[in-house]
Every structure is written in C-alpha cells, then in structure tokens.
C-alpha cells in the first residue's frame, strides 16, 4: 500500500524566508534573491565555492536541499536518495540571460557559464555532486504544482527498490519570483505520503 511511505521532513523557501517542518528557520530582509542566497549560504555556514557560479534556480534548489539533507548520515557517501523535482518555468530565467547574449549580432558573445544552466535538470546535478548521490533523478514541467504525479513517481521508485528515499517537490524561479517546496519521503516519518497531505503541506505558505 502507498501509505507505507512517509514524509520525513519538508521545507519551504519563499519571499526571503525558510521554513523547516513548518517552523520559521530563516527570515531575511533582502529583496533581491542574490542577496538572500548569499545571506542564507553564510547563515548555514556552507563551504562550497561552486555555489556562487550556479544559476538562480540551482541556488534555490541547492539551499532547500541543504535544509533537508544536512541531517542525513554524513559518512554515508553513497546515499540512495533519488531526486524528483518540478516547476512551471523550466530554466526560463537563465534562458532570458542566454538569449540576450546571442540576439545582438554586433555584440555576440554567448557565455558557456550561462549556457550550461539552460536546462532545468542541471540543479539536480548540483545537488547530486554536493551530497554524493548516485541514484535516479528526474525534473518535470507542469503548469502548476502536481502532487499526484510526484507522489506516484516517488512511490514507484521506492516500491521497486530504485531508491531508499526520494527528495521530491517544486522549485520555481522566474524573474524576481521564487518558491521552493521540497520534502524527503521514505519508510520512516510521521506524515503519510498521500496526495492530500502533500497538497496541504505545499499550501502552508
């Protein structure tokens, strides 16, 4: 049965705030995401220089995953945690930056550092490198948050032994608007991994 799987922890990031299991963890007065991301990086005392080269979507997903995965056993270098994320804007924010660099024939200079982030699933790679994850990962594009698909896909991975846990949810960045809702699901936890429960958690903020 699907209710054999449980939501272990969850996280929200929105409007300069970070909530962990519904409790306010970080509040920041920065109106610019770049400032908020740097402040959060310092708050968590993260040491990962590559963070500053990431696009905004990857930084958002990276910070949310830090909140949830920091409690995983640090000596387990091959954690079997699958990644299943989604949004409605793909990598559009970075795509706009790349487009500006190629639309002017007189000043044509596409940056490889920008181009590499014109796929939304790159943020999955950044999380996997950071936490040494070698399991399956997928990134889906939906018009809106789709709890049913995420629940079915994560349960399938768990039921078929493709992963011991799944980091799943929504991470969206478009211009100045950003939102992340991630949760870790496995066999242990207090919240049944059910569609209505996932929707309720997502709608808290």
Image (cartoon, grey):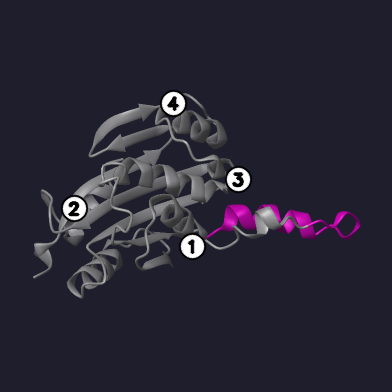
Between marks 3 and 1, how big is the CA–CA gap? 16 Å
Percent position (x, y) of residue 189?
13, 50
Q: Residue at label 4?
A: 28
Q: Give the range drawn in magenta.
A: 90-109
Secondary element at image label 2 = strand
- Dot 2 or dot 1, earlier in sequence: 2
- Dot 3 or dot 1, earlier in sequence: 3
Query: Which quarter of the picture shows residue 16?
Result: top left
Circles 3 and 1 in contact, beta carbons < 8 Å: no
**Given the current orientation, which residue lies at the most extreme right position?**
106
Between marks 4 and 1, how big is the CA–CA gap? 27 Å
Circles 4 and 2 in contact, beta carbons < 8 Å: no
Q: Is residue 70 above or below residue 170?
A: above
Q: In this view, does 27 lie to the left or right of 59?
A: left
Q: Residue at label 1?
A: 121
> Mark number for residue 53?
3
Circles 4 and 1 in contact, beta carbons < 8 Å: no
Quadrant location of the N terminus in the rendered image = bottom left
- Other residues around mark 3 within 10 Å, as few (<14) / some (14–19) / many (≥20): few
Q: In this view, does 79 lie to the left or right of 39?
A: left
Query: Which quarter of the picture shows residue 4?
Result: bottom left
Circles 3 and 4 in contact, beta carbons < 8 Å: no
Percent position (x, y) of residue 155?
21, 68
Secondary structure mostly taken by the magenta-highlighted segment of the chain: helix
Q: Residue at label 2?
A: 7
Secondary element at image label 3 = helix
> Which label lies toward us, 4 or 2?
2
């Amino acid at each position: 049965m699907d209710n054999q799987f449980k939501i272990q922890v969850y996280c929200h990031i929105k409007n300069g705030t970070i909530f962990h299991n519904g409790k306010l963890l970080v509040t920041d007065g920065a109106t610019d995401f770049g400032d908020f991301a740097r402040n959060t990086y310092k708050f968590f005392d993260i040491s990962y220089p590559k963070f500053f080269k990431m696009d905004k979507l990857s930084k958002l997903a990276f910070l949310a995953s830090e909140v949830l995965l920091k409690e995983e056993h640090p000596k387990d270098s091959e954690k079997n945690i699958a990644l299943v994320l989604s949004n409605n804007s793909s990598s559009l924010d970075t795509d706009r930056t790349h487009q500006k660099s190629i639309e002017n024939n007189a000043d044509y200079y596409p940056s490889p550092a920008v181009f590499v982030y014109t796929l939304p699933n790159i943020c999955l790679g950044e999380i996997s490198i950071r936490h040494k994850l070698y399991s399956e990962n997928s990134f889906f594009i939906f018009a809106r948050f789709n709890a049913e698909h995420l629940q079915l896909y994560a349960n399938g991975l768990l039921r078929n032994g493709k992963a011991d846990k799944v980091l799943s949810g929504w991470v969206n960045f478009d211009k100045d608007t950003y939102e992340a809702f991630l949760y870790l699901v496995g066999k242990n936890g207090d919240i049944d991994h059910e569609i209505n429960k996932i929707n309720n958690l997502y709608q808290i903020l």
